[in-house]
Image (cartoon, rainbow, N blue to C red):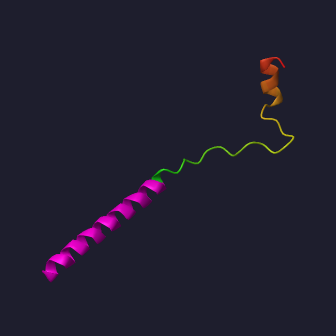
Amino acid sequence: MRNRGRKIWSTWMFAAALLLGLGAASTASAQPPPGPPGPPHRGQSLLTPEDRAAMGQ
């Protein structure tokens, strides 16, 4: 009987470790890929003079 309790406990611990491992892996893989830098500093425009000329502004 004591052996059965130990087996159940170890099964639960294995399941918990598996879930924690999967959670950590999914969290790591859910990070967005690195992209372009953020918005420009204040006072700087996103458009270059060439862009403005092409749009007719």
Q: Choose top left, top right, bottom left or bottom right for residue 7.
A: bottom left
The magenta segment is 1-28
Q: Nearer the viewer, residue 35 or 24?
A: 24
Q: Is 18 drawn above or below residue 57 in the view shown?
A: below
Q: Position of residue 56 (x, y in %)?
A: 82, 17
Residue lying furthest left? 1
Q: Is residue 21 magenta?
A: yes
Quadrant that contains the C terminus: top right
Q: Nearer the viewer, residue 36 or 29?
A: 29
As drawn, is 51 to the left or to the right of 10? right
Q: Is residue 54 magenta?
A: no
Q: Position of residue 33 (x, y in %)?
A: 55, 47
Q: Position of residue 50 (x, y in %)?
A: 80, 26
Which secondary structure class fits the magenta region best?
helix
In the image, what residue occupies the spot 20% across and 78% down?
A: 6
In the image, what residue occupies the spot 69% across and 46% down?
A: 37
Residue lying furthest top? 56
In the image, what residue occupies the spot 82% across and 21% down?
A: 53
Q: Choose top left, top right, bottom left or bottom right for residue 35.
A: top right
Quadrant that contains the N terminus: bottom left
Q: Nearer the viewer, residue 8 or 31?
A: 8
As drawn, is 16 to the left or to the right of 36? left
Q: Is 18 drawn above or below residue 49 in the view shown?
A: below
